[in-house]
Image (tube, rainbow, N blue to C red):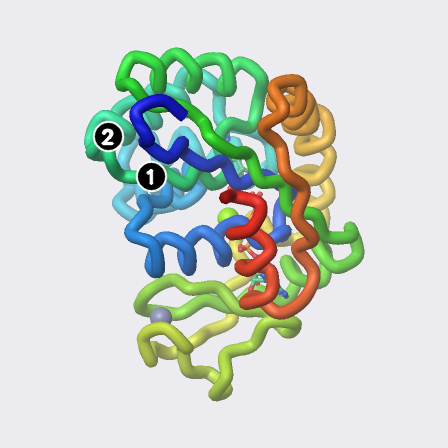
Amino acid sequence: MSHGRPGDLILMGPPGVGKGTQARLLVDRNGWVQLATGDIFRDHLRRKTPLGELAASYMYKGSYVPDDVTVGMVRERIAEIPRETRVMFDGFPRTVAQAEALDEILAKQGRAIGRVILLDVPRDELLDRLASRATCSICQAVYSTGHPPKAPGICDRCGGAVVATARPDDSPDVVRKRLEVYSDQTEPVVRFYDARGLVRRVDGVGDVEDVIKRLLEAAA
Ligand code: AP5
Ligand code: MG
Ligand code: ZN
């Protein structure tokens, strides 16, 4: 990387692989910024903005929000992040068109992707995780049967109440569709970055802290 600036990171992998879980912990500990397109859409939805309503019509079916909408939103968000701050992209880019647009956006700002981390978890475990999702009612940290809070019902990070929170798109039918869309539209993005030698594959099974260690090694 030129000028010693560490490149930005992309966290990739199918629904339920742990992108959000890992990204939140990593930004907390390293002063990075997480840019999670799914979280931004859900935030718009909570605030009932037109963008939120548009996004929901796709999310609830398990299909992707159109590229121009998603890219426009990311362009605005990146512009607010100081150039020295390392960005951890979570759930973006998800199509080759988004990846190409991201290159252009980053180049204009003197930024670049330094590493793409691909988390890997077997399909059966993905299905289990998404069927048992629980979330902190205060900080939105996520839990599941395989990753429960240390004290039952109490968030490890902030002490908030942990409540069962299947998302509307966690129903078995929609999860199946999300996995299908991932193979069709997002696996080509892995090949796009593989061709540049940027991808590191990381085993996403096991204790969250072990996954973080593997991830940090791969990101270095
Ligand atoms: P998005 O919100 O990005 O969802 P996703 O990637 O489909 O899946 P998740 O967020 O469920 O998975 P995750 O990998 O973050 O796992 P998590 O940490 O939560 O996207 C949702 C929708 O928004 C899309 O379908 C699309 O419609 C739209 N969208 C978003 N971005 C878009 C884009 N770029 N373009 C177009 N449309 C876009 O963990 C899952 C569960 O596993 C949790 O319960 C957690 O506690 C548990 N868990 C995590 N780690 C472990 C572990 N090590 N062991 C055991 N359990 C674990
Ligand atoms: Mg997520
Ligand atoms: Zn919390």
- Kindly state the secondary structure of the residue where label 2 is placed: loop
For image coordinates 40% across by 69% down, the residue present is 136
Mark-to-mark CA distance, 1 and 2: 8 Å
Q: Amino acid at mark 1?
A: Arg
Q: Residue 207 at x, y = what percent?
A: 62, 69
Left or right, 218 with respect to 41, comes to: right
Q: Amino acid at mark 2?
A: Arg
Q: Which mark is residue 86?
A: 1
How crowded pointer 2 is (Cα within 10 Å; few <14, some 14-19, many 20+) is rated as: some
Q: Which mark is residue 169?
A: none
Q: Label 2, on which residue?
A: 83
Identify whether 133 is placed above or below 93: below
Locate the N terminus by quadrant.
top left
Identify whether 98 is placed above or below 176: above
Which quadrant of the structure image shows residue 137? bottom left
Query: Which is more toward the observer, 47 or 30?
Result: 30
Q: Residue 203 at x, y = what percent?
A: 69, 53
Left or right, 202 with respect to 74, comes to: right
